[in-house]
C-alpha cells in the first residue's frame, strides 16, 4: 500500500475547486497542506487568498510574485514563436501552467513536502500540463489529483461540500461560468458557455470594452522591438510587465482581443472557450508586420510551418520537453533581425498595421519599385519562369498524348 503523504503543497487559487480540495486533502490523508498561489497578475483576486486558505485549514500560505518571470521567460519566448493554437487561441492559460508548477515544486522543496496537488479536472488539459512539469522537474514527488480520486463528481457536489464546511462559494447565478486570469489574458468556460450556440453574457468580459461601445475615434500607437521582444510603446521604454500592462489597457479600451472558439483538448474532447487577450493580440499583429520586413522568405516559411507544432507543445503541456527547447532555439534565431518599429491603428476591435520600419529591413524600394530602375533586369524573369514551368510542360505533353 502506498504510504500517505505527510505534507502536500497545493496549487491554490482561492476558487471553489481548490478551496474544497484543501479541506478534502486534510480529511482524506490527515496531512499538512501548504497552499501555494502564483501571482501572475490576477490583481484583486489575490487579496482574500491568504486568509481564506488559512481559514480552510492550510498550515502555511505562499503567494509568490512571478509576474516578471512570466512575461520574460514564458510569454516573450512563446510570442517570439508566434504561437497560436488552432488559428485563434493565444495560449494564455496554457503558458501559465508550467511556470505555476515549477514554482510549486520549488515551494515543495523548501517546505520538505513529499507531495504536490492540483485542482485540474480529469477531463481537462491542465492536469496534463501540471503533471508533465512535475515529472520533468521533480519526479520523486507524489502527485495527488483529487478530481480523479474523490466522489465529488460535479460542481453541484463541490458547492454542497463547501457549504457543509463553511467555505465561501464564488460561483453564483450571476456568474455561471469559471474564469482564469493572468497578466496575458482572461479565459472563460463552463456553465452557460457549454452550449456553443449561446452567446457570452455581455457583462462577462473583464479586460475589454464591447467593440460596438469602443471609442469612435481610432488610436494609433508605435511599438518598438529588439530581437523580437517589445521594448517600448509610444517611444517610452518600458519593462516587460509595464509594457504588457500598457498594451492591455490600450487594447482593452478599443475592444481588442476577444476570441470565442471551440477547441480540441489534448484528452480528446472538444470544449468551448472564450478569451480576452488585448495586449497579446496587438503584439502578434505588430511582430508579424515587422517580420515581413526583416525575415528571409524561406526562413519565414520554415518558421511558419513549425508554429502549429510549437503551439501544440505549449497547449499540451510539453514546455519542459527537449523538442520544445530545440524548436525554441530555432524560433529565437529567427528573431535575431526582428528589430524596428511598427505603427498600428486600434479601432473597435481591430488592429490594423499602418507602418513599419527597421534598420535590418530586407525591403528595397530600388528593387521593388514599378518605376524605372537600374538594379533589376526584367528580361531575366523569362528564364526563371521557363525553368520553373518545365516540369509542368512535360506533364502536360505526356497527358496530351496519352
Image (spheres, rainbow, N blue to C red):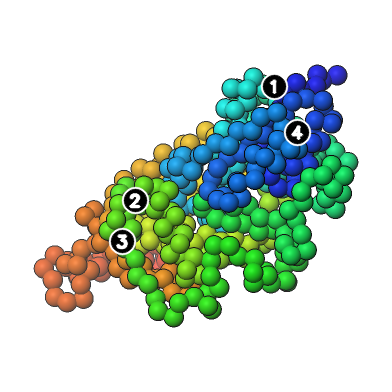
The residue lying at 79 percent from left, 45 percent from top is 167
The residue lying at 56 percent from left, 33 percent from top is 103
* 4 or 3: mark nearer the eye: 4
Q: Quadrant of residue 235?
A: bottom left
Image coordinates of residue 358 in percent, x first then y, are 25, 57
Q: Which residue is mark 3?
A: 234
* 1 or 4: mark nearer the eye: 4
Mark 4 and mark 2 lie on one chain; the one further toward the N terminus is 4
Q: Is residue 389 left or right of residue 271?
A: left
Question: Mark on residue 114?
Answer: 1
Tell me the distance, in whole angstroms, between the alpha carbons under discs 4 and 3. 48 Å
Mark 1 and mark 4 lie on one chain; the one further toward the N terminus is 4
Q: Which residue is mark 2?
A: 238
Q: Which residue is mark 4?
A: 57
Tell me the distance, in whole angstroms, between the alpha carbons under discs 1 and 4. 18 Å
Given residues 171 and 197, the one toward you in this image is 171
The residue lying at 67 percent from left, 22 percent from top is 113
**Outermost residue toward the bottom in this view:** 216
Image coordinates of residue 62 in percent, x first then y, are 60, 33
The residue lying at 75 percent from left, 45 percent from top is 17
Element at label 1: loop
* 4 or 2: mark nearer the eye: 4
* 1 or 2: mark nearer the eye: 2
Element at label 4: loop
Q: Are marks 1 and 2 in contact (CB under 8 Å)?
A: no
Q: Are marks 2 and 3 in contact (CB under 8 Å)?
A: no
Element at label 2: loop
Tell me the distance, in whole angstroms, between the alpha carbons under discs 4 and 2. 41 Å
Amino acid at each position: 500500500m502506498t504510504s500517505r503523504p505527510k505534507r502536500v503543497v497545493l496549487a491554490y487559487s482561492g476558487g471553489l475547486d481548490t478551496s474544497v480540495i484543501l479541506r478534502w486533502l486534510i480529511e482524506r490523508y490527515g496531512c499538512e497542506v501548504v497552499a501555494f498561489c502564483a501571482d501572475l497578475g490576477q490583481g484583486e483576486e489575490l487579496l482574500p487568498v491568504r486568509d481564506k486558505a488559512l481559514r480552510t485549514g492550510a498550515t502555511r500560505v505562499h503567494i509568490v510574485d512571478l509576474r516578471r518571470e512570466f512575461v520574460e521567460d514564458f510569454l516573450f519566448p512563446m510570442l517570439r514563436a508566434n504561437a497560436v493554437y488552432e488559428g485563434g487561441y493565444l495560449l494564455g492559460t496554457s503558458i501559465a501552467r508550467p511556470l505555476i508548477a515549477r514554482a510549486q515544486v520549488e515551494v515543495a522543496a523548501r517546505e520538505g513536502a513529499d507531495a504536490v496537488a492540483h485542482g485540474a479536472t480529469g477531463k481537462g488539459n491542465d492536469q496534463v500540463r501540471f503533471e508533465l512539469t512535475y515529472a520533468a522537474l521533480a519526479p520523486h514527488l507524489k502527485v495527488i489529483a483529487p478530481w480523479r480520486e474523490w466522489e465529488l463528481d460535479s460542481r453541484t457536489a463541490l458547492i454542497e461540500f463547501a457549504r457543509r464546511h463553511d467555505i465561501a462559494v464564488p460561483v453564483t447565478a450571476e456568474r455561471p461560468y469559471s474564469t482564469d486570469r493572468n497578466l496575458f489574458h482572461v479565459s472563460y468556460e463552463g456553465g452557460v458557455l457549454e452550449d456553443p450556440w449561446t452567446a457570452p453574457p455581455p457583462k462577462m468580459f473583464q479586460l475589454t470594452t464591447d467593440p460596438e461601445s469602443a471609442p469612435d475615434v481610432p488610436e494609433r500607437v508605435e511599438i518598438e522591438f529588439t530581437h523580437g521582444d517589445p521594448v517600448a510603446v509610444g517611444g517610452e521604454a518600458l519593462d516587460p510587465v509595464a509594457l504588457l500592462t500598457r498594451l492591455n489597457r490600450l487594447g482593452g479600451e478599443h475592444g481588442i482581443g476577444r476570441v470565442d472558439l471551440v477547441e480540441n483538448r489534448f484528452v480528446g474532447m472538444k470544449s468551448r472557450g472564450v478569451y480576452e487577450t488585448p495586449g497579446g493580440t496587438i503584439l502578434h499583429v505588430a511582430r508579424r508586420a515587422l517580420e515581413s520586413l526583416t525575415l528571409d522568405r524561406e526562413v519565414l516559411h520554415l518558421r511558419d510551418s513549425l508554429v502549429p507544432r510549437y503551439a501544440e507543445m505549449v497547449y499540451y503541456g510539453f514546455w519542459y520537453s527537449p523538442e520544445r527547447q530545440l524548436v525554441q532555439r530555432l524560433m529565437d534565431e529567427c528573431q535575431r533581425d526582428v528589430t524596428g518599429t511598427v505603427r498600428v491603428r486600434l479601432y473597435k476591435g481591430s488592429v490594423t498595421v499602418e507602418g513599419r520600419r527597421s534598420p535590418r529591413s530586407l525591403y528595397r524600394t530600388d528593387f521593388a519599385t514599378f518605376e524605372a530602375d537600374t538594379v533589376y533586369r526584367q528580361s531575366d524573369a523569362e528564364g526563371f519562369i521557363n525553368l520553373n514551368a518545365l516540369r509542368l510542360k512535360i506533364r502536360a505533353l505526356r497527358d496530351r498524348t496519352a
